[in-house]
Image: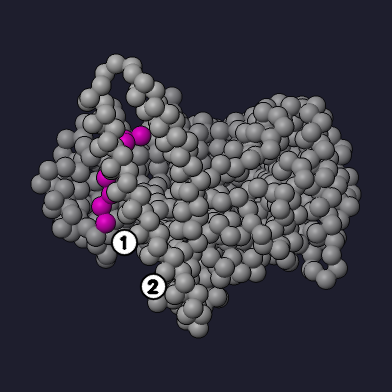
């Protein structure tokens, strides 16, 4: 730009001429308006002169229509000018960063939003208030309009090439499902956004393979984005999604799309100049047996080129048909395909409980199942000595005798344990069976901790205390969200006494909140506590909670002061709130009390 001064001078002269012409046009328009008002004041009836005036109005209307094209050209020129401006490293200082930094930033931007991290990286995901907007992140970086002619972009695919500054997009849908998917596609993913900021960012983005690893197998034909992203991803791990939920069970278009996409996928992973691809596969469907069988039978053809590491299956139909759990799941190609899975998430679907897929897992999540037995869970725990994360939600466990003594299973690798929406027997079984000496995160949400009699209550309390006697020594984050049948306060206080290293504590819907806060203040428990989230139960009085929170911050004996505090506005109010703000670095007022 600096050397081509003649071009710059010509552009500045054209701009000056444009300004002069616009000033002249504005003055002429003002004169025309004054003339029209004078004519309207002189006559109010139809006359021959009025007919002449109508002809003038018609000519003005035609000229007015031409302004749309002029404004469009002016807007396009403005966008191009701003693109040129944004490439300056002096005006836009971010351009001073090297390409390697841009690449790392882009990769972080494409990742899922991380939970708020404080202290030991153990603060709860509820701490992210999500106030950062796209406008704040990308303010001043206008989207270019001159990328549609890029050589490596498919001309017939609108999703990436169409301008993303609000211009209408032709989604080319053929049916209702496709139209819905195409509308969702207009919400530009991060990798597409950064590849349309400027030429340099585009070059960096296209050469960063990690940005293009997320592909959808139900993309409508001609699946240009799928092919392009597979090529750009290079040899990086793939994150593949198959969302078949919008399709009917016998929808031929789904099978056609899936088979076509699988051909592109097999062609990409079969390239001999690349190592075998690691794959994370997510399947959402209302007819899992048919879809998974078709998918795995095709992937089994290139199983030597694929390393399936993570598998997530969600059955939206919740139909536990016997055909799901028959011998095809144990066919040799499928066994070879599934033997490398280390992360398994099942929602409304399960493989036969004696299937080898339940061995050597490091991450297991089971949700919304019925008919699971104690023997199944015990077998999984014993077959997965390296299990690091376990989540069980809304699942009924049969075959447990609350009077019997559970079999103890030590899980040394387990550091994250989540239980959600479980009944009393399931809670007693899990906490009576698991021994996790290195547990760091525990979440209990809407679990039934209230027995029908005093004997059951004592049973639960003893089970929890024995569990925390081992797990509490390493526990850093504890979250409890109580439902209609809460845990007795004395057991919760006893649990906290056995967690001396607890740094982050989250209580939602707790009935005896004041008892817990008083124990934290006066009993010298949890001396390392630095982060606290509280939402009192709607059935209990919040009176005195603000005073106790202030006392907790000021009077408690602790190793570290409270660094983070979150509560509803009914608690954080008045002079107590002002005093807390002076002493706590970060205070968040929660939007509701749920």
- Residue at the (84%, 50%) spot, across then down: 263
How packed is label 2: few (under 14 Cα within 10 Å), some, or many (20 or more)? few
Q: Nearer the viewer, residue 580 or 265?
A: 265
The numbered mark at residue 91 is 2
Q: Where, by quadrant of the figure, is residue 491 drawn?
A: top left
Q: What element carries label 2?
A: loop
Q: Distance between the residues labelled 1 and 2?
A: 47 Å
Q: Name the residue under label 1.
A: 528
- 81 up-or-down from 42: above or below: below
Q: Position of residue 438 (x, y in %)?
A: 51, 60
Left or right: 205 as drawn, with respect to 335 = left
What span is colored magenta in the figure? 586-594
Q: Position of residue 324 (x, y in %)?
A: 79, 33
Q: Where, by quadrant of the figure, is residue 413 drawn?
A: bottom right
Label pair 1/2, CB-CB below 8 angstroms: no
Q: Nearer the viewer, residue 339 or 458?
A: 339
Q: Which of 34 and 43 is in front in this view?
A: 43
């Amino acid at each position: 730009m600096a050397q081509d001064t003649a071009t710059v001078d010509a552009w500045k002269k054209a701009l000056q001429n444009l300004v002069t012409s616009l000033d002249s046009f504005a003055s002429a328009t003002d004169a025309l308006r004054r003339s029209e008002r004078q004519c309207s004041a002189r006559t109010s009836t139809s006359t021959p002169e009025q007919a002449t005036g109508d002809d003038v109005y018609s000519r003005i209307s035609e000229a007015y229509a031409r302004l749309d094209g002029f404004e469009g050209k002016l807007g396009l020129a403005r966008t191009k000018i701003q693109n040129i401006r944004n490439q300056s490293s002096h005006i836009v200082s971010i351009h001073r960063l090297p390409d390697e930094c841009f690449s790392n930033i882009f990769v972080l931007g494409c990742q899922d939003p991380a939970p708020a991290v404080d202290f030991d990286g153990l603060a709860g995901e509820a701490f992210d208030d999500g106030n950062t907007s796209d406008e704040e992140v990308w303010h001043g970086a206008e989207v270019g309009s001159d990328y549609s002619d890029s050589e490596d972009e498919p001309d017939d695919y609108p999703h990436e090439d169409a301008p993303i500054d609000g211009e209408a997009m032709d989604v080319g849908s053929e049916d209702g499902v496709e139209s819905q998917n195409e509308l969702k596609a207009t919400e530009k993913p991060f990798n597409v956004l950064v590849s349309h900021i400027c030429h340099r960012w585009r070059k960096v983005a296209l050469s960063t393979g990690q940005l293009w690893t997320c592909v959808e197998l139900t993309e409508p034909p001609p699946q240009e984005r799928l092919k392009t992203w597979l090529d750009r991803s290079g040899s990086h791990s793939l994150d593949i999604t198959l969302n078949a939920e919008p399709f009917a069970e016998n929808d031929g278009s789904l099978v056609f799309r899936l088979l076509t996409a699988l051909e592109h996928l097999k062609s990409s992973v079969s390239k001999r100049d690349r190592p075998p691809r690691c794959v994370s596969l997510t399947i959402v469907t209302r007819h899992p047996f048919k879809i998974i069988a078709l998918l795995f039978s095709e992937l089994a053809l290139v199983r030597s080129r694929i390393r399936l590491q993570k598998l997530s299956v969600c059955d939206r139909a919740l139909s536990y048909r016997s055909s799901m759990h028959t011998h095809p799941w144990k066919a040799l190609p499928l066994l070879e395909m599934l033997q490398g899975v280390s992360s398994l998430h099942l929602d409304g679907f399960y493989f036969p409980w004696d299937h080898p897929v339940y061995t050597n897992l490091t991450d297991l999540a089971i949700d919304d199942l019925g008919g699971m037995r104690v023997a199944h869970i015990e077998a999984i725990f014993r077959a997965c000595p390296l299990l690091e994360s376990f989540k069980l939600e809304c699942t009924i466990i049969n075959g447990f005798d609350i009077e019997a003594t559970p079999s103890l299973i030590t899980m040394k690798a387990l550091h994250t344990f989540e239980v959600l929406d479980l009944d009393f027997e399931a809670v007693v079984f899990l906490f009576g069976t698991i021994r996790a000496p290195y547990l760091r995160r525990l979440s209990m949400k809407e679990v039934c901790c209230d027995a029908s009699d005093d004997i059951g209550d004592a049973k639960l309390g003893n089970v929890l205390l024995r569990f925390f006697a081992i797990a509490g020594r390493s526990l850093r984050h504890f979250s409890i969200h109580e439902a209609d049948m809460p845990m007795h306060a004395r057991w919760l206080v006893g649990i906290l006494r056995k967690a001396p290293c607890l740094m982050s504590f989250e209580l939602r819907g707790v009935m005896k909140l004041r008892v817990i806060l008083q124990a934290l203040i006066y009993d010298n428990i949890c001396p390392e506590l630095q982060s606290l989230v509280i939402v009192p139960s709607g059935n209990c009085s919040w009176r005195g909670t603000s005073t106790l929170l202030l006392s907790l911050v000021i009077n408690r004996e602790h190793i570290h002061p409270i660094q983070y505090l979150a509560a509803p506005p009914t608690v954080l109010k008045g002079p107590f709130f002002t005093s807390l703000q002076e002493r706590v670095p970060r205070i968040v007022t929660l939007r509701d009390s749920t």
